[in-house]
Image (tube, grey):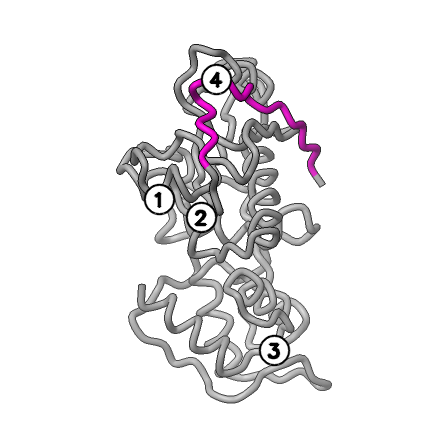
Amino acid sequence: MVKIIQALIPKQHRNRPGNTMKPLYITVHNTSNSAKGANAASHAAFVARSSTGVSWHYTVDDQVIYQHLPLNENGWHAGDGRGTGNMKSIGIEICENADGSFEQAVENAQWLIRKLMGDFGIPLSNVVPHKHWSGKECPRKLLGRWDQFKAGIATAHTGSKSTRKPVQTESLSHKAPVSKQKSSNLPSGILKVTKPLTKGPQVTAVQKALSSLYYYPDKGAKNNGIDGYYGPKTANAVKRFQLMNGLAADGIYGPKTKNKIEQLLKK
């Protein structure tokens, strides 16, 4: 758990409009401020100034999270005026200060997003980059690995392997073990952990499909854990996928999981 410090913008300030909001989306930003000391506390001080015109709900660094607005009030962060981005989404800024760990700040933000998704029933599909609303290249350090960032929401601060190792945009295509495909050869029926373990090409097909969506059976292991065996690590990958896509998270591959994987592979 990451410490959350509530430091709300004063009600009389112009960047706290006070419009009632029921959040339907979570919008992710980078601060675009790499100066030393440009951490969450620094941005909390900035957004609390009476002269500041912009506002968002949370700033996250590698140590702590600051909350600036109540979650039932909108902020001015999405660049779409009174559109859905500003009026219906929770804004999260991730610090990139040179004297902090950006990857740790990313994991802290992923943990916060997972918490907010659970609190408000927001689906993973509604976790979007700032660019979604205004076209701005933000979050600038995450757009090139957006799918990996979203996949890491399921594992942040759980002890499971996540996406903390940075991946360069230009190398994504050959680092991922399998590229997304327009169609799949996913098996029908049920796959789950059994004794002895179920093995064969049908399991390999599921493992490859999950890996192409960044839900690796065993990230960092040989072939990222694609071994043709439906063991606990593959079941965990299925469970993480289910959790992040609104399915019953039981680690059992079945028709609903198959359909959702196929739907995402076609995007």
Indicate the position of residue 165 as horizontal and vertical percent values: 54, 42
Q: Amino acid at mark 2?
A: Tyr
Q: Amino acid at mark 4?
A: His
Image point 67% across, 46% down: which residue? 157
Mark 3 or 1: the one toward you: 1
Residue labelled with disc 3: 252
Q: CA distance from mark 1 to mark 2?
A: 9 Å
Say what secondary structure mark 1 lies in: helix
Circle 3 residues within 10 Å: few <14, some 14–19, many ≥20: some
Please state, as top left, top right, bottom left or bottom right, where the C terminus lies in the image: bottom left
Q: CA distance from mark 3 to mark 1?
A: 36 Å
Give the mark, 3 or 1, whose residue is nearer the N terminus: 1
Q: Nearer the viewer, residue 211 or 6?
A: 6
What label sits on residue 84 in the rendered view?
A: 1
Residue labelled with disc 4: 13
Q: CA distance from mark 3 to mark 4?
A: 51 Å
